[in-house]
Image (spheres, coloured by chain):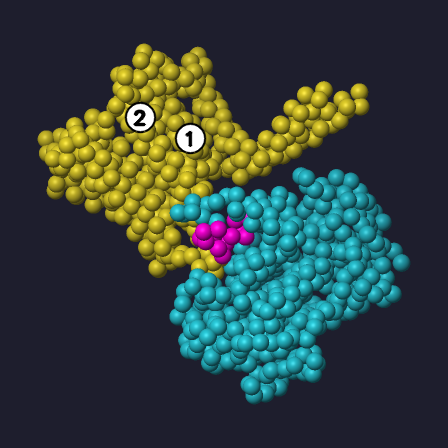
Amino acid sequence: MAFVIEMLNITKEFPGIKANDDVTLQLKQGEIHALLGENGAGKSTLMSVLFGLYQPEQGIIKVRDKEVVIKNPNDANDLGIGMVHQHFKLVHNFTVTENIVLGYEDTKKGFLQLDNARKRIKELSEQYKLRVDPDALIENISVGQQQRVEILKMLYRDSEILIFDEPTAVLTPQEIQELMKIMKRLVSEGKSIILITHKLNEIKAIADRCTILRKGKYIDTVEVKSTSNEVLAEKMVGRKISFGVEKTPAKPKETILKVEEVSITDYITQKIVVKNVCFEVKRGEILTIAGIEGNGQTELIHGITGLKPLTKGKVILKEQDITALSIRQKSLSGISHIPEDRQKHGLVLEYSLENNLILQNYFTTQFQNRGFFKFDNIRDHAEKLIERFDIRSGKGPLSQVRSMSGGNQQKAIVGREIDRNNDLLIAVQPTRGLDVGAIEFIHKQLIQERDQGKAVLLISLELDEVMNLSDRILVMYEGEIVGEFDPQKTTENELGLYMSGSKRGKQQ
Amino acid sequence: MKLKTLGSQIVKKVAERPSTISVSASVLAIIAGLFVGFIVMLIINPGQAFAGLRSILFGPFSDMEGGRSLGNTIYYAVPIILTGLSVAFAFRTGLFNIGATGQLTIGAFVAVYIGVNWAFLGPLHWIVAVLGGMLAGAFWGSIPGILKAYRNVHEVVSSIMLNYIAMYTVTMLIKQTIFNATSARALAPETTARLPQWFLGDVFPRSSINIGIFIAMILVVITHIILNKTTFGYELKSVGFNRDASQYAGMSEKRNIILAMAISGGIAGVAGAVMFLVTGRFMSIENHLMAEGFTGIAISLLGLSSPIGVFLAGLFYGALEIGGFYLQRTTNFVPQIIEIIIAVIIYFSALSLFLQKFVANFLSKRLKKEVQISEGSDVL
């Protein structure tokens, strides 16, 4: 079979780093080709080269056996290459049709002609079963639908080669299923797909071949069917990865956190987002709250940690009522919190790593004296955490956090919060968007905390994670706890039914 | 040869520091401004263009009899350093204080009011007047701070509007309290309220210099320390960079926003006091916004929002002002040339991101060459 795209021996350098070092990628006609690598392995750079955003220092690109130079995204479009970016590039107050024709408009004497476009979008949408309403406003449709608009955009421009940049990162499990169907349909209609990802399950489920990059270098291209997950992971990370999480049975002791009949009403929408939630977390156990995103988990945790006021109910930490305390007082009374959104709440991206590592305790006498910082102690603290939690960055304690990879940003937060040595550790989606190496590391840390007698409250959307880590599972649906499960005695299927609201039990 | 490699290593180290790139962007902006000014002079009057450029560049050294021009350079620089510092401080804490003019006006009025009326204070008179100006500026600055903290009103909008409110209020208050009806302007502050010269009068005789420069230096040092060495500055900057993360870390974002604006306003208030607690300068009742507040924005940009950078940029501005003064004395150019140069510098400072990229590219290319050369010489 012929190759539609060949990127041969591509080298792309940035100051101080070779983002792509002699990388080769060959895409066959009609295949789904996965591009696998950890965060920072050079996947995005390689695709940016193909899309004309960067010029490679060395190497050639061939499209259908013809050598080409792609100077900018327009060249790429002309060659039939289209890209669905991880963060969609859509105008929120435009309709689907307007977004799709943007930059490609039909005009007649200077006036916009949308009718033909609309018709064509409808046809395409039916042909590929995308189910997108051409007249809907972007802001009114779901994230999954927005992604399909991006796909339509490429189809509308007659792209033959489609690049998906981590397309599932923002989708719910159901939407992921749907997307995979769509991708298969696209391939069966003769398109070729490059799928950028670090999720092995997706590659197994859908890709034909897989090219693996590590630290900018080309490692291998393999047939997915005949390669196990373990081998893929090993090639990606460069060492053996254990998938199962090893842990001993929990030995729960006294209650650390008690949440009593907590309700939260959203300030803006006046909707009740958390309803009468009660539960306890004990010393030495990991309690997981599972659920599909947007079912009140975020608000519940914000309520417990003080970021949002409670409408009703009590939060009791070590037999002390902390409901009315300020965020700082709550945190000081013994809560460590790994927040859901690391860039929004967890870090000050403009600060150096060492300054971020003292974000929760910069005011203690360890780091300041009469308001003046003790810079030596801050540096020592940072170096200690960097070593203990293997936080990798360009310039050590002085690296700007913005320039660090997602995995290392998360390690910094995890390290900071664990190091505070509080009795309660709240971890909200601690592994979101991370690659297997970092996930493995963070899971180990959480279990280690449990074994050292901390109470761990985990919020997770990933069923694997829920099943592997938890000692007890609560499922949250539409703001309520709809069931409690023992991970030894339940299945992912059963949890799924509760998470989607098809089944509900009584709260214990 | 080892020395050479060592040398190129040092060059490389300096070049790789991010501050090098941003500082060179500011320097480039200045050079571009002077260049455009020179072109303009060439067009207007080619014969005198070089003389004009010389008098702009060496303005502070034009009248060295006792260092008069140098002293006046400093005298003109002080208010601009202070307003620049005011804007820079707010900027470092994530706030854009366009209201320095208003805070300066209010500060100036209170300082002059005290200067006119409270002569009983004796030797403490000028100190109290400056402090009064500072407090008044802080009060005026805290208003947009409070509006932002509690009502999420953008500080740019509220502080701009407060500029006009300050201007009209002060005109009204001057007419009612410290009005000099014969000259239709505010009364002059008592001599005890004017900033003393101390030994500076001997170092720079015949110039208008006063101890304002020391006040500016002290404030530069204090703000530098607050921003870089204290937990207070850490909180202020955190809130500016990321309100959500600061809230998560238990900081009081409201308090920090208000304090940041009050400090910024206080510095602008001092600028107002320093401007008018002198001999021969009077607050006017013509309704116009004082330009010093806006120039402060440009100086803050040029000084890369760092207190020390602002200090240097402010001195440079003072030098340009003096240069403009001597320009019209020695040549037949109008001093507006200086305004053009300053405007171009401001434009280029605003383009500093672009310039920084330019410098970064240039350096990386240069470094590659250097490395190649030194590698090559190793082979030889």
Q: Which residue is mark 1?
A: B313
Q: Position of residue A30 (x, y in %)?
A: 82, 62
The stretch of residues the image draws in magenta is A350-366
Query: Is any atom of residue B268 visible in this view?
Result: yes
To which residue does mark 2 refer?
Answer: B75
Secondary-structure class at tag 2: helix
- What quarter of the picture does the N terminus of chain B occupy? top right
Based on the picture, tell me whether residue A364 belongs to the magenta stretch: yes
Q: Tell me if residue A424 is in the magenta stretch.
A: no
Describe residue A218's horizontal placement relative to residue A418 as left or right. Answer: right
- Classify mark 1: residues with Cα within 10 Å, few (<14), some (14-19) or many (20+): many
* Chain where mark 2 sits: B
For image coordinates 62% across by 78% down, the residue present is A473
Q: Single out the residue that lies furthest toward the right.
A: A1
User: Principal SS element in the magenta part?
Assistant: loop
Chain with colour cyan in the figure: A
Could you tell me which residue is drawn at 85 percent across and 49 percent down? A65
Which chain is indicated by disc 1?
A: B
Q: Can you give x and y, in whole percent of width and height, for residue B145 in the image?
A: 34, 52
Residue type indicated by callout 1 = Ala
> In the figure, is residue B191 to the left or right of A251?
left
Q: Position of residue A508 (x, y in %)?
A: 56, 86
- Is the residue B312 above or below the residue A242 in the image? above
Amino acid under label 2? Tyr
In the depicted view, which residue is nearer to us: B111 or B105? B111
Could you tell me which quadrant the C terminus of chain B lies in?
A: top right
Q: Is residue A280 above or below residue A387?
A: below
Say left or right for A398 vs B122. right
